[in-house]
Image: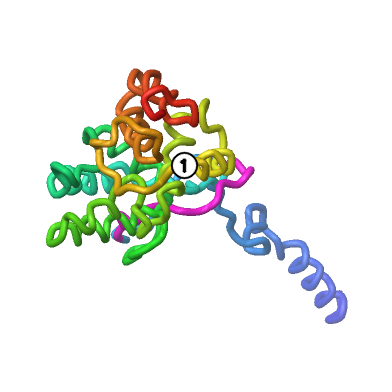
């Protein structure tokens, strides 16, 4: 065979051997698949205790919380507000009702001093250590005009705790605008045709399912004790 024939055979042999079985991944790159409901993290990377915020999507593989504040954060907040806001400044009838209410708040951002959020209430409960009469009501369920207006706080909790009576935030806010809101809230507001009375019964309803069955009907316009 001449030199030209030998060169042609060698070229054909190299072309045939250019792609080995299993080498396809070098052309397409690697793909990582994450199953729905699983979470991966880089070893050694710190986690944070920041409240989770976001928007739920229809994709089963990507779901984030719209509001929910972590229960551990709420437990700390509730331990502080139960200890610092007592007597005429008390904001919740029990720690259990506080935690349930807290998990209903929008999370907010660290350092918030206003707006209807957990973060704002966290700021004001810290401030209440020095000035409870001023800051306890801001750290409480209604927000007291600092952490949102009282209807915003009321409805954030109501749609979670009493969904039959308050099926949506918009419907709740519409009803709440008709409630008299002319007094500073505390857990002594057990009667009277006011928003404060209905907020009291809402905080009691947050304590347990049995409490909700009794007290959710007291949170609406035609509330027997709040008339």
Figure quadrant of residue 167? top right
- Quarter of the figure that contains the C terminus: top left
**Is residue 14 in the magenta section?**
no
Residue lying at 36% horizontally and 47% vertically, measured from the top left: 142
Q: Mark 1 Cα within 10 Å, few/some/many (few <14, many 20+)?
A: many
**Can you give x and y, in whole percent of width and height, for residue 131 in the image?**
15, 60
The picture places residue 208, in percent across and down from the top left corner, at 32, 24
Asked if residue 15 can be seen in this view, the reply is yes
Tell me which segment is drawn in magenta.
Answer: 46-60
Residue 171 image-quadrant placement? top right
Give the secondary structure at mark 1.
helix
Above or below for 10 versus 28: below
The image position of residue 109, as x and y in percent, is 38, 62
Number of numbered callouts drawn: 1
The quadrant in which residue 5 appears is: bottom right
The quadrant in which the N terminus is found is: bottom right
Q: Which residue position holds label 1?
A: 155
């Amino acid at each position: 065979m001449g030199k030209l024939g030998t060169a042609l055979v060698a070229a054909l042999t190299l072309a045939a051997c250019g792609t080995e079985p299993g080498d396809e991944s070098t052309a397409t790159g690697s793909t990582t698949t994450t199953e729905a409901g699983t979470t991966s993290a880089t070893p050694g990377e710190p986690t944070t205790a920041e409240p989770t915020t976001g928007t739920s999507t229809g994709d089963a593989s990507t779901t984030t919380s719209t509001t929910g504040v972590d229960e551990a954060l709420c437990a700390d907040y509730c331990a502080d507000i139960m200890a610092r806001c007592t007597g005429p400044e008390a904001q919740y009838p029990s720690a259990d009702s506080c935690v349930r209410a807290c998990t209903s708040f929008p999370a907010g951002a660290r350092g918030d001093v206003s707006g209807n959020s957990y973060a704002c209430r966290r700021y004001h409960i810290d401030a209440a250590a020095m000035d409870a009469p001023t800051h306890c009501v801001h750290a409480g369920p209604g927000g007291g005009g600092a952490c949102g207006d009282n209807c915003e706080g009321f409805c954030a909790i109501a749609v979670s705790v009493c969904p039959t009576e308050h099926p949506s935030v918009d419907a709740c806010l519409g009803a709440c605008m008709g409630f008299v809101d002319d007094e500073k809230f505390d857990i002594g507001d057990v009667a009277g045709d006011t928003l404060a009375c209905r907020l009291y019964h809402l905080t009691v309803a947050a304590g347990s399912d049995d409490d909700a069955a009794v007290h959710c009907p007291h949170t609406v316009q035609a509330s027997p004790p709040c008339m």
